Amino acid sequence: MTEEELRRHLPQGLAHNRLAPAQNRPAAVLVPLEPGRGVWLTRRSAKMPNHVNQVAFPGGKIEPGDASADAAALREAQEEVGLNPADAEILGRMDDYITATGFHIVPVIALVKQNVRLMAAPGEVQEVFCLPFATLLDKDQPRLRRAVLRGGEHEFFVWPHEDHVIWGVTAELLRQLAWRLRGET
């Protein structure tokens, strides 16, 4: 998708549903979109205390010093993948999301400059990679899978990638993004 197409589907001030703060831990993730390429994701380091080796957006806890969720998402992206905040233009937010593990996530959408240089922060991120827009725009994706987790059978979405398994919250946020980019919402 070109920058113009992204701006048409994701206009500035994008409307989103905010959830009332509860006892969940506030977090923000950056959904970095590179025109002509795709959405940037990370694979978390094996050294992290939780969600080891899982695919995620750059992001984390909203700190008391963060001016907003947008600021937290940009700070985390700078820490995790070296994204210079000047290379990202915030377009808006997707709907807030509450995880089963007790996080209240605010997904912040940003356009990043073409050929942006990102680098994994040792100890936090194992790898930085891009999921192409062609995959997001494929109406046959993501695929619904079933598995036994924590003693019960669960259904969840999985996005295709030759090197990574993209599932869980990341897959759900990508699914919501895909709906917008495909014009389905």
Image: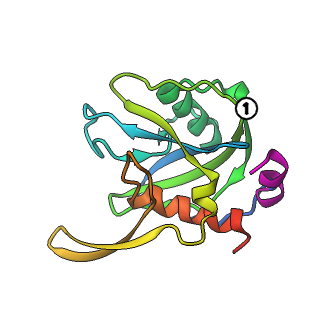
Asked which quadrant contains residue 67, the reply is top right
Where does the magenta region start and end?
Answer: 1-10
Q: Name the residue under label 1.
A: 113
Q: In the rendered image, which quarter is residue 115 located in?
A: top right
Q: Where residue 56 sits: x, y (%)?
A: 44, 46
Q: Quadrant of the C terminus?
A: bottom right
Left or right position of 37 against 30 = right
Please say which color scheme the image uses: rainbow
Is 5 contained in the magenta span? yes
Magenta stretch holds residue 120: no
Secondary structure of the residue carrying tag 1 is loop
Estimate the x, y position of residue 125 in percent, counting from the top left. 39, 31
* Image vertical order of residue 174 relative to residue 163, above or below: below
Image position of 3 with respect to 98: above or below: above
Query: As rendered, which of 172 and 108 lies closer to the eye?
Result: 172
Q: Which amino acid does label 1 sit on?
A: Lys
> As displayed, is residue 80 above or below residue 168?
above
Image position of 21 with respect to 110: above or below: below
Q: How crowded is mark 1: few (under 14 residues within 10 Å), some or many (20 or more)?
A: some
Residue sitting at x 60%, y 71%: 139
The residue drawn where x is 23% and y is 77% is 153
Main secondary structure of the magenta stretch: helix
Of 96 and 175, nearer the camera is: 175
Farthest-out residue, left: 151
The x and y percentages for residue 180 are: 69, 65
